[in-house]
Image (cartoon, rainbow, N blue to C red):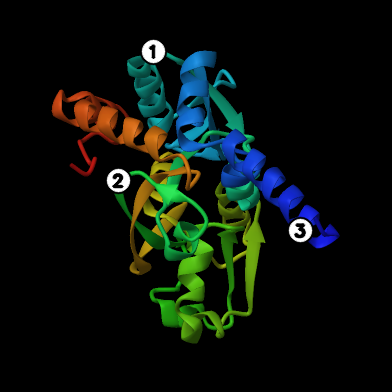
Amino acid sequence: MTFRSSFRIAVYSIALLLVTTGVWAGGSQESDQTTLAKIEEQGSFVLGLDDSFPPMGFRGESGDIVGFDIDLGREVAKRMGVELELRPVDWDGVILSLNKGDIDMIWNGMTITESRQEKIDFSKPYLANRQIIIVANDSNLTSKADLAGKTVGVQMGSSSEEAISGEPEVREGFKELKKYADNVVALLDLKAGRTDAVVVDEIMGRYYIGKRPGEYKVLNEDFGREEYGIGFRQEDDAFRKKVDAILKEMNEDGTTAEISKKWFGEDIVLK
């Protein structure tokens, strides 16, 4: 037997071993079925979120993480027979955290976008949303055209930033697109006069300014409509389908409607 033949046989044997043990086929990621089985075995899954995004997920008066998505997540975990673990992460790197395995899902008012779908999978949409423009109550800005020469705030890595980029003719007119770690800080800067406007998810923005009457107003124009979904690793098909099935069940028995009324005063969940 020649050296070349021996080398080929050795390579084939190693490749066969990697495939049969699942190392080659799955890379460094666990297989879909293994992920769901691991969650069921360990009795919990990890929900990643930005903990300053009311009313989806944020710190309540006691310091505990509360919110609409948190209530949904707890109910899903309960029906799966496991516990829910909450893990705040840097939103700008949340997809990386998911794909590294630091968290099991992203459930935090996450907009379904084409660029994100290239990296992760999503549940079925569960809420509709818009990218609204918030200004100070005494501002004379009335339209997107008025943003020319102005400083506009946005959360770094958010769908708001992506929506603005989708309208380059408007974006190019800004004096500055100021990026923040979270929306709350951006809105505080707006109140202090350090920015002229903030582009933000309508669900978060209206909840926030509703708690502060007379301080802000929303322009009639927006940067587009979108839908929220839960983010999963692309190989976690069984886990995603499990969560989708439970949410469907919760829609049918009225649980999601009850949770929605608690946070929004009405049932706004997509059916």
The answer to whether residue 142 is left or right of residue 50 is left
Where is residue 235 shown, x and y percent of the image? 48, 44
Q: Earlier in the sequence, mark 3 or mark 1?
A: 3
Q: Earlier in the sequence, mark 1 or mark 2?
A: 1
Q: Which residue corresponds to the image point at 45% horizontal and 31% vertical from the top-left?
A: 33
Mark 3 surroundings within 10 Å by alpha-carbon count, few (fewer than 14), some (14 through 19), many (20 or more): few
Tell me: residue 169, above or below residue 217: below
Disc ID at residue 25: none
Q: Which residue corresponds to the image point at 33% horizontal and 36% vertical from the top-left?
A: 241
Q: Which residue corresponds to the image point at 79% horizontal and 53% vertical from the top-left?
A: 6
Residue receiving disc 1:
81
Q: Please identify the quadrant where the N terminus is shown.
A: bottom right
Where is residue 122 shown, x and y percent of the image? 39, 48
Count of numbered badges drawn on the protein: 3
> Which residue in the rendered view is the most extreme toward the front?
1
Q: Are marks 3 and 2 in contact (CB under 8 Å)?
A: no
C-alpha gap between disc 1 and disc 2 = 22 Å
* Type of amino acid at the residue the image marks with label 3: Ser
Q: Are marks 1 and 2 in contact (CB under 8 Å)?
A: no
- Tell us which disc is closer to us: 3 or 1: 3
Disc ID at residue 124: 2
C-alpha gap between disc 3 and disc 2 = 52 Å
- Tell us which disc is closer to us: 3 or 2: 3
Q: Which residue corresponds to the image point at 47% horizontal and 36% vertical from the top-left?
A: 32
Q: Please identify the quadrant where the C terminus is shown.
A: top left
Residue receiving disc 3:
5
Residue 248 visible in the current orientation: yes
| Secondary-structure class at tag 3 | helix
